[in-house]
Amino acid sequence: MPQIAIAKVRDEPRAATMHIDIVGDDGGDLIGEVIVDPAVTFDLASASMCIDKIQYGLVDFNCRLAFEYPTGIVRAWSIAKGNGGTDFNWFGSLPDRSTEMGGCGKLTLTTSGLKAGRYGSLIIALTKKR
């Protein structure tokens, strides 16, 4: 099973920044791995989130972020291998739309091409909404 380490590097009343470190092995890809659960991460059971910024460095694999809801996922953003970042603030953030469908606001990560010797990191800046 690939290793994933998640750390909150900034926690403010209305914002948080998460650092996600991923190391591949022979176990294959991560599928729907919860990386942020507002009820646990922020202790806000009724909170939803918006993604404000993403910075990343992925060595030879891709990933997708999605918000979880009872009958599936709401795809949020796809990240291709390499280094880069996206600032969503120019249009007001990327909101969690899953709560409109009865979702719980969990942010998940799915990888594609994660194998032994491949690794990467994500920095995700979030705005917490009530």
Image (cartoon, helix red, strand yellow):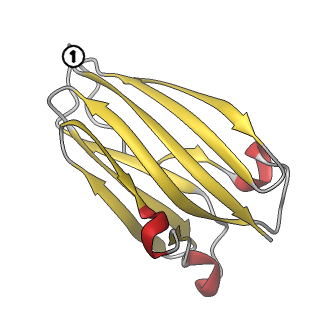
Horizontal relation, residue 52 to residue 23: left or right: right
Looking at the rendered structure, the kind of residue marked 1 is: Ala
Give the class, few, some or many, for how many residues have Cα within 10 Å of label 1's Cα (few <14, many ≥20). few
Q: Quadrant of the C terminus?
A: bottom right
Any part of residue 1 in sight: no
List x then y, in percent, for residue 100.
Answer: 62, 86
Q: Which residue is mark 1?
A: 116
Q: Quadrant of residue 72?
A: bottom left
Q: Is residue 88 above or below residue 117?
A: below
Horizontal relation, residue 28 to residue 75: left or right: left
Q: Is residue 47 above or below residue 103?
A: above
Residue at the farthest front position: 90
Q: Is residue 6 above or below residue 98?
A: above
Q: Quadrant of residue 119?
A: top left
Q: Is residue 38 above or below residue 9?
A: below
Any part of residue 17 in sight: yes
Q: Nearer the viewer, residue 129 or 41?
A: 129
Horizontal relation, residue 25 to residue 81: left or right: right
List x then y, in percent, for residue 58.
Answer: 25, 31
Residue at position x 54%, y 55% from top?
107
Give the number of marks. Answer: 1
Residue at the farthest bottom position: 100
Horizontal relation, residue 49 to residue 94: left or right: right
Residue at the farthest top position: 117
Q: Nearer the viewer, residue 44 or 26?
A: 44
Residue at position x 51%, y 68% from top?
93
Residue at position x 59%, y 85% from top?
101
List x then y, in percent, for residue 64.
Answer: 32, 53
Q: Quadrant of residue 120?
A: top left
Q: Quadrant of the N terminus?
A: top left
Q: Which element type, helix, strand or loop, lies under badge 1?
A: loop
